[in-house]
Amino acid sequence: MLRIWQIKIFHWNFGAVKAATLTSAIKISFLKGMNAVLSSLFFSLFNHQTMTKSNNLLDKFVTLSFPIYIFHVLPCMVLSAVLIGMVLSQGQVLIGAVLGAFVLGVVLYYLLIKFTPISWIIWGYKNHGCNHLTDINLND
């Protein structure tokens, strides 16, 4: 019985190219392996390139990530309850809650953190290149 099960699995192709000979099977396996390795290498180098260059959009997302993490729970729960009350499908509730929580998180970030001293508490005080102790000229 075990042998029949092994033969059935061996004959399932899952859409793969059938190899006529052992040599062609080795070539196909090699090409599949190279495809996996080169795809991984491409995505690794692409991400490295994106992370090492200065990217305004990426910097904006990094800045927004922590406040959205802080503010996402309550808007997500409220939006989910409202969308469920509107008798929407599960997919519509999920997409609406995710997008709505993101938008409300960004709005709350700009209202409560961006232009207030609360940002100092979250990210620390940034000096922006002005050091008042060294800018004073005592010789004048």
Image (cartoon, rainbow, N blue to C red):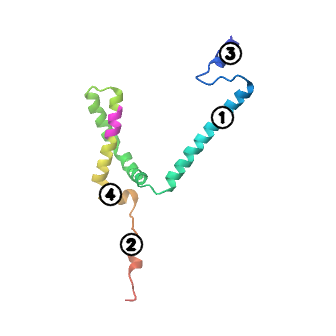
Which is more N-terminal, label 1 or label 3?
3
Mark 1 lies on residue: 31
Report helix, strand or loop for mark 4.
helix
Q: What stretch of residues is rendered in magenta?
A: 94-100
Q: Quadrant of the C terminus?
A: bottom left
Q: What number is the disc on residue 118?
A: 4
Mark 2 lies on residue: 130
Mark 3 lies on residue: 7
Q: Quadrant of the N terminus?
A: top right
Q: Which residue sits furthest right?
A: 22
Q: Position of residue 13 (x, y in %)?
A: 61, 21
Mark 2 or mark 1, whichever is nearer to me? 1
Report helix, strand or loop for mark 2.
loop
Dot 2, crowdedness within 10 Å: few (<14), some or many (≥20)?
A: few
124 shown above or below 61:
below
Mark 4 or mark 3, whichever is nearer to me? 3
Main secondary-structure element of the magenta-colored stretch: helix
Check disc 1 and give the amino acid type. Answer: Leu
Check disc 3 and give the amino acid type. Answer: Ile
Distance from Cα at disc 4 to Cα at disc 2 = 21 Å
Identified at 35% across, 58% down, the residue is 119
Distance from Cα at disc 3 to Cα at disc 1 = 25 Å
Check disc 4 and give the amino acid type. Answer: Ile
Distance from Cα at disc 4 to Cα at disc 3 = 66 Å
Dot 4, crowdedness within 10 Å: few (<14), some or many (≥20)?
A: few
The part of the image, by quadrant, that contains residue 137 is bottom left
Mark 4 or mark 2, whichever is nearer to me? 2
Identified at 40% across, 52% down, the residue is 57
